Image: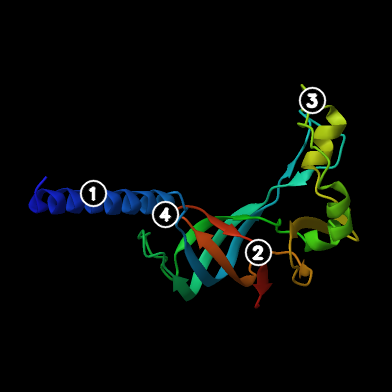
């Protein structure tokens, strides 16, 4: 084979390798969900507080799960960090919108439990060599199991929402909301819906 042919096929090989690498990189990025991060101040115009029953009953006989929503007016956009990969419509000051409340509109505590505290190094060392069995899922859940999964516990008048992570911030206490309150909050926006998580009442 001549030197020109060798160089030609070597060049083709480099182009193909580079193209495959770029394609794999794009596919990985495409799997990520792009979102904007928006910090705003808003006024609560109306509130609807719903209690969902874990069981299919007209009159719920067990503790309910709150599912609150309301209408807000956006008073001020403090910061809008845009995702460079996609462009969502901008929020407009004085815009009115429907919002859901992740941690209810009632008094709540957002509590973190450290995974490092839950799973000690000693436990890991003692059990890492034990072969794990495949979990056996029940065919159906009992009423008590369904209730436990759907119930938000109440502690001293506060709904308690718990999440798990490696390192925990201090517990966040949310005082609850009323119509007319002005709040400051940050949301991750994916082009539709406003979800109010942790918030601060400013007036």
Answer whether labels 3 and 4 touch (C-beta < 8 Å): no
- For the residues marked 3 and 4, what is the alpha-carbon distance in whole angstroms? 37 Å
Q: Position of residue 160 (x, y in %)?
A: 81, 57
N-terminal of the pair, mark 1 or mark 3, is: 1
* Image quadrant where residue 86 sits: bottom left
N-terminal of the pair, mark 3 or mark 4, is: 4
Residue found at the very far top of the displayed protein = 139
Residue 155 lies left or right of residue 86; in this view the side is right
Residue 23 lies left or right of residue 11; in this view the side is right
Asked if residue 60 is positioned above or below residue 153 in the image, the reply reads: above
Of tags 1 and 4, which is closer to the observer?
A: 1
Q: Which mark is residue 29?
A: 4
Residue at (13, 51) in percent of width and height: 8
Q: Which mark is residue 138?
A: 3
N-terminal of the pair, mark 3 or mark 2, is: 3
- Mark 1, residue position: 13
**Looking at the image, which is closer to me, 43 or 121?**
121
Q: Badge 3 local density, few (<14 within 10 Å), some, or many (20+)?
A: few
N-terminal of the pair, mark 1 or mark 2, is: 1
Q: Secondary structure at mark 4?
A: helix
Q: Secondary structure at mark 2?
A: loop
Q: Badge 2 local density, few (<14 within 10 Å), some, or many (20+)?
A: some
- For the residues marked 1 and 2, what is the alpha-carbon distance in whole angstroms? 66 Å
Of tags 1 and 3, which is closer to the observer?
A: 1
Q: Position of residue 201 (x, y in %)?
A: 67, 74
Q: Position of residue 74 (x, y in %)?
A: 50, 68
Location of the C terminus (image quadrant): bottom right
Asked if residue 114 shows in the view, the reply is no
- Mark 2, residue position: 179
């Amino acid at each position: 084979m001549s030197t020109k042919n060798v160089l030609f096929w070597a060049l083709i090989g480099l182009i193909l390798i580079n193209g495959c690498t770029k394609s794999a990189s794009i596919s990985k990025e495409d799997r990520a969900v792009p979102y904007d991060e928006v910090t705003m101040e808003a006024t609560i115009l109306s509130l609807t507080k719903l209690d969902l029953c874990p069981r299919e009953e007209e009159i719920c006989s067990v503790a309910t799960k709150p599912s609150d929503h309301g209408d807000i007016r956006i008073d001020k956009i403090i910061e809008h960090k845009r995702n460079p990969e996609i462009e969502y419509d901008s929020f407009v000051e004085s815009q009115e919108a429907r919002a859901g409340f992740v941690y209810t509109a009632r008094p709540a505590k957002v509590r973190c439990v450290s995974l490092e505290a839950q799973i000690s190094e000693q436990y890991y060392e003692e059990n890492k060599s034990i072969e794990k069995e495949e979990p056996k899922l029940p065919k159906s859940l009992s009423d008590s199991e369904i209730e436990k999964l759907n119930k938000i516990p109440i502690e001293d008048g506060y709904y308690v929402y718990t999440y798990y992570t490696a390192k925990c911030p201090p517990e966040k206490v949310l005082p609850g909301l009323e119509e007319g309150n002005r709040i400051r909050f940050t949301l991750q926006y994916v082009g539709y819906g406003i979800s109010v998580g942790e918030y601060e009442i400013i007036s």
